[in-house]
Amino acid sequence: MNASAFSEPFTPRGVAAFARAKFSRLLLAQFVIAVLAAFAVAWFFYENCFSTIQTAIDNLPPDSEISSGVLEWHGDSFLELAEGRFVAFDVDISHSGQFRSTADLQIEFGHETIRAFSLFGHADFYYPPNEIISFNRTELDPLWKAWRTVILFLIILAVIIALLLSWWILATIYFLPVWLAGFFTNRDLDLRASWKLSSAALLPGALLMTAGILFYGLGLPLVTFLFIFGAHFVLGWLYLFFGLAFLSRTSSATPKGNPFKPGGK
């Protein structure tokens, strides 16, 4: 069974094999897929956000800031800062609606709030009331250039940790129902094996989501990406269901020979 866990890692049979594999092998598979997903996310932000952020900073005035919950803006009341395929930035002091971007996410800086527009509508976020935040080209440009590599590394680290934790939490939620299903279908599945099966069943969905992120970064429409996001959960449930079918059945305890004769013969 253990060999199947790596020769067929993305089939229901291969996922079922992780139920009998060592925990270290499951952890290795999870870590490898988490790293792949993390690099995909980091690549997406680098290709679709970083250059737009740099352009937005370049278009800021040299002496504005956010102070006491208010944007002290030294420029026109409306200014389009930068627009990319994924994200756009603008300043509209009164949120007058002069600019509606075709980007999937629009970040608009107003007098007292940041307004975020997306497919789902918009939401306002107030500036911190007791903070002074630089909002000018003079200070943000060197700061961004110094930290953007660190930010990429932190994105990778955060995604790896978040994925591993989410998989372990979901496996902890799933494993009791999976064990009960195995019990009633007469499968050779204890609680430990049920947890490992539940963990392994999440990995094919994670790979689907990783592919979705890559294609989204290359131009896949947002609606299609959201469909993939939903489908990656369903895929995990399907692998759980079909993975159970590939587990061996518990052996019956039928005695050999005739039990009514001495020695069973």
Image (cartoon, rainbow, N blue to C red):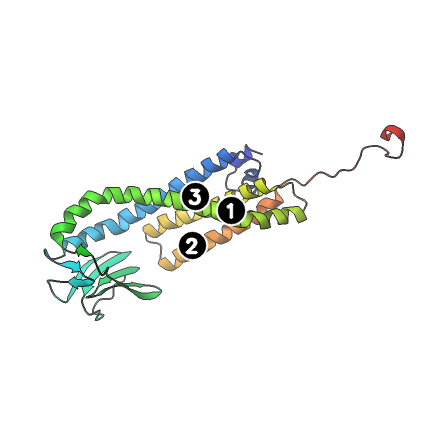
SS category of the residue bearing label 1: helix
First of labels 2, 1 by sequence position: 1
Determine which residue is flagged by label 1.
171
Q: Residues within 10 Å of mark 3 (few under 14, many from 20)?
A: some
Cβ atoms at labels 3 and 1 below 8 Å apart: no
- Determine the image quadrant of residue 131: bottom left
Q: Is residue 126 above or below residue 33?
A: below
Q: Quadrant of the N terminus?
A: top right
Write the residue at 36% across / 48% down.
214
Give whichever of discs 3 and 2 has the lower sequence position.
3
Which disc is residue 164 wearing? 3
- Specify the amino acid type for callout 2: Phe
x, y percent for residue 209: 42, 49
Q: Is residue 118 left or right of residue 59?
A: right
In the picture provided, is 53 more to the left or to the right than 220?
left
What amino acid is at disc 3? Leu
Q: Is residue 103 visible?
A: no
Q: Position of residue 237 (x, y in %)?
A: 53, 51
Count of numbered labels shown in the rendering: 3
**Residue beneath label 2, please?**
229
Q: Is residue 9 left or right of residue 151?
A: right
Amino acid residing under circle 1: Ala
